[in-house]
Amino acid sequence: MAVLLATPALAAEPVTGTWLTDAKDGLVEIAPCGAKLCGRLAKMLVAPKGPAVDRNNPDPALRNRPLVGLAVLTGFAPDGDVWRGTGYDPKAGKNYATTLQRLGPDTLKVKGCVLGFLCRSARWTRVR
């Protein structure tokens, strides 16, 4: 006879703090914004070619926004062992369904998907 043991759902580890992107080109600060979490580009470590503005945004009215301070992660809420929300890639000017997952105290897995199955993952490192 099989015995099923109930196990508590995994709780999403906190993801707040400052993180170095996998390309080592920027720092993203994740903090509460209202009831959810958001992440803003806190610092650029590699200067872009041309002005540091959101020039690839599909909305022409937003193309002159400065990249530093730009919200690149919005609306994140815990869902099991991950945080779900929307990620914005200013290099592509696109939004992606995104999950954040702590892989350890200083490693964050960032996974962005389009169409639910075309995904790319990156590993960010905590900045102390």
Image (cartoon, helix red, strand yellow):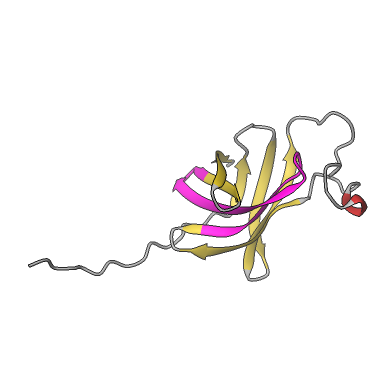
- Is residue 99 highlighted in magenta? yes
- Is residue 51 highlighted in magenta? no
Task: Indicate the quadrant containing the N terminus: top left, top right, bottom left or bottom right.
Answer: bottom left
Q: Does residue 122 lie above or below 29 as drawn?
A: above
Judging depth in this view, the residue of 49 and 40 nearest the camera is 49
* Residue at x 62% of width, y 38% of height: 21
Relative side of 44 to 1, left or right = right
Judging depth in this view, the residue of 126 and 117 nearest the camera is 117
Question: What are the residue bounds of the magenta stretch?
Answer: 83-108
* Residue at x 47% of width, y 49% of height: 102
Which quadrant of the structure image shows residue 5? Answer: bottom left
Return the residue found at the far left.
1
* Residue at x 81% of width, y 31% of height: 48
Q: Position of residue 11 (x, y in %)?
A: 42, 63
Relative side of 111 to 55, left or right = left
Relative side of 54 to 42, left or right = right
Count of numbered circles on the image: 0
Q: Position of residue 73 (x, y in %)?
A: 67, 54
Magenta portion: prevailing SS class: strand
Which quadrant of the structure image shows residue 49? Answer: top right
Q: Does residue 68 lie above or below 33 as drawn?
A: above
Q: Position of residue 28 (x, y in %)?
A: 67, 46
* Residue at x 80% of width, y 45% of height: 68
Task: Indicate the quadrant containing the C terminus: top left, top right, bottom left or bottom right.
Answer: top right
Q: Position of residue 7 (x, y in %)?
A: 28, 66
